[in-house]
Image (cartoon, rainbow, N blue to C red):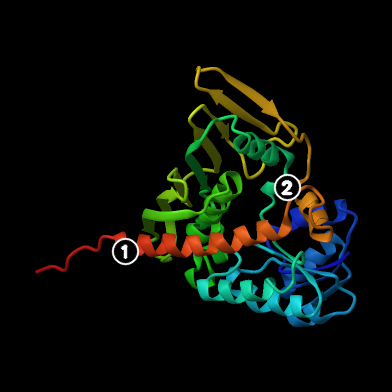
Amino acid sequence: MRWAFLGVGRVTPRMVEAVRLAGHSITAAAARDPVALQKWCETHQVAKSTHDFHSLCDADDIDVIYVALPPHLHTELAIRALKSGKRVLCEKPLTAHLEDSRRLHAVVSQYPDRFCHASAFPFHPRSRAMRDLIAGGAIGEVTRATFSCSFSHVLQRGRDYRTDPSAGGGCLLDLGWYCALATQWFTGERPSRIQAMGRRHADHGIWLSAQAIVELQSGAFAHWDCGFDAPGRKWMEIAGTKGSVICDDFLRPWDASKPRFWVHGSDGKARSEMVGENVNQEARMIESLWESNHHAIDLNQLTEFGFQAQETLAAWEYQLIETSIHPSSPQ
């Protein structure tokens, strides 16, 4: 497949490696910053560059569009690419606003097996192993699901859409996405009720931290914690009536050669398991975009989970706003 990258930001070098590892080629790239675009194309040996995103969506020599731009730009470009016959890999969150998510969802539904969000952790064999253990009853009936995602350097980066609320910035969309998506991926359940607390950044207006207690459809509870105010965390625990599954780097192994997780039993004993050493999860995701179910992943189901995550994030933010405490005016 011949790829075009829309955007040349920090997330793209990993995807360049994955595209080529999967045996595909990168034909073109587009970005608004001409200096950054030229440097990126030279670094990654991509011959064609342009500032016109739409032209690549329409180009006959492109098979796949990778939308790696800020979330507020995703909807129009993804829709145009799909209607032009392209497959689309779209960075998360899918959109900055719920209305755009619903509009994109309506179009994506018309093109099965041709769209996927770029959350790659489900494509790692370890994720499937943990999911199968949970579904197979190894920990009994699920009663708790806890996900914590954070990193603290975003505010020191300088220019970054994550500090701009109008572009889809803030920890809720950026990291809360993983909490919502992973809960449904690992448990198969959607939220039925949510309560939340959080804190906005005083200058940027973005959500700096956000927490939620969520009741799932079965009556089990999920606990979500995300923020730009703590060091890197990508931690999960799924607890049941007979034990729990714990992983301290579920989004991506800290060490690719040691993709570990732990199973704790009700007897106090624990065992460590290692599955999928040195696997490139992005390359597996790309292979699945070309051939649906290539790695036993239902691409359409995963895409649907992504749009449901957008609905959940909107409900989460609504609760954050409703529970905010505003200081009283001086008398």
Q: What amino acid does circle 1 point to? A: Glu
Q: Position of residue 313 (x, y in %)?
A: 48, 61
Residue at the image position 40 percent from the left and 55 percent from the top: 193
Q: Position of residue 42 (x, y in %)?
A: 84, 64
Q: Earlier in the sequence, mark 2 or mark 1?
A: 2
Q: Position of residue 49 (x, y in %)?
A: 82, 74
Q: Position of residue 255 (x, y in %)?
A: 70, 35
Q: CA distance from mark 2 to mark 1?
A: 36 Å
Specify the quadrant that holds the N terminus: bottom right
Query: What label does residue 123 carry, if any?
Result: 2
Query: What label does residue 268 carry, if any?
Result: none
Q: What amino acid does circle 2 point to? A: Phe
Specify the quadrant that holds the C terminus: bottom left
Circle 1 residue? 322
Looking at the rendering, which quadrant does residue 39 occupy? bottom right
Q: Which of the two residues, 111 or 166, is positioned nearer the viewer here?
A: 111
Circle 1 — which element?
Answer: helix
Q: Quick check: 48 above or below 264?
A: below
Q: Is residue 221 left or right of residue 251?
A: left
